[in-house]
Image (spheres, helix red, strand yellow):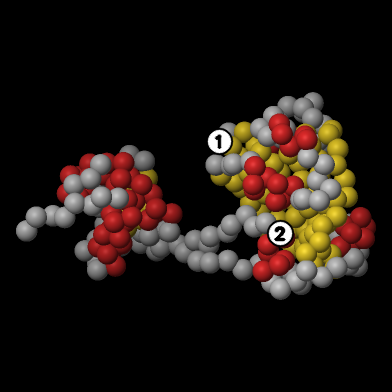
Amino acid sequence: MNTPKFRNWQSVQTEVLRRIHAREWRPGDLIPNEADLALEFGCARTTVNRALRAVAETGVLDRRRKAGTRVAVQPVAKATLNIAVIRNEVEDAGHSYDYQRIKRREIAPPPSVSKAMKTPPDQWLLHVCALHLADGASYAYEDRWINPAVVPSILDENFETISANEWLLKHAPYTHGEIKFSATSATQGEADVLQCPLQSALFTIDRITWDIDTAVTSVRLLFGPGHQIRTDI
């Protein structure tokens, strides 16, 4: 029987997953290398590489440089988190959305921000703070730093009617990001903006997005008590 040719990486991915689920490749097994799989499947090695990367991203394969690719012994389920337009998030939940810009200025950031974004300490960044509302009530406080060197056109936007969150997702491509979730205690200023008691536990998201090795933006999003987040695994 002739081995069918696989024309795209999705078909290779499907076959790889089939072999794993059928236990043709068992947990801990070292699978054939990319060159051998490309020959077997009748496709380019780059096609196999893309398929294996996609499977590895789900936690089913363990890929190590110079050590090959093995079927994971204990697959780790990975959650997928999209960077949401907060306006859409509020409206999709059936609420009326509103937005208020609190602050917009070009200044040198605190050392912690320039260090995290890997910018020179004296380089000015755009600092935008805003409040997102749902049905007239405080929903999320956005404290954001943006690197104009990556997106110069952002300096022409005053953010009176559109949030930096929404503007950046439309105009500033990024390659990857870093994200941290935590619970923080509301300062007096944060409590006033979010209309909650001082030192309330706030659901906090700190995120930096990058264009290869240059930081595009660093943002802290603060949500009031009781906020929940859902994602897929």
Residue 6 visible to an observer of this rendering? yes
Which amino acid, mark 1?
Answer: Ile
Residue 165 image point, x, y percent: 71, 50
Snapshot quadrant of residue 83: bottom right
- Label 2 sits on a secondary structure element that is helix
Give the label on residue 86, or none: 2
Residue 113 visible within the image: no
Q: Please name whichever residue, 156 or 190, is drawn nearer the observer in this view of the structure.
A: 156
Nearer the observer: mark 2 or 1; the answer is 2
Amino acid marked by disc 2:
Ile
Vertical order, 76 against 101 (above or below): below
Q: Is residue 101 left or right of residue 162?
A: right
Q: How many discs appear?
A: 2
- Name the residue rendered at 43%, 54% in the picture: 57
Quadrant containing the N terminus in the rendered view: bottom left
**Percent of width and height locating residue 115:** 71, 35
Where residue 194 sits, quadrant-wise, is: bottom right
Residue drawn at the location 61% of the way across and 47% of the way down: 178
Q: Position of residue 175 (x, y in %)?
A: 55, 42
Residue 187, image quadrant: bottom right
**Left or right of 171 in this view: 9:** left
- Give the mark nearer the N terminus: 2 vs 1: 2
Q: Residue at x 22, y 48 (%)?
A: 37
Q: CA distance from mark 2 to mark 1?
A: 25 Å
In this view, which residue lies farthest toward the left?
1
- Relative vertical location of residue 38 with respect to residue 126 in this rendering, above or below: below
Q: Position of residue 201 (x, y in %)?
A: 80, 66
| Label 1, residues with CA under 10 Å away: few <14, some 14-19, many ≥20 | few
> What residue does disc 1 label?
212
Q: Residues within 10 Å of mark 2 (few under 14, many from 20)?
A: some
Viewer-proximal residue among 22 and 130? 130
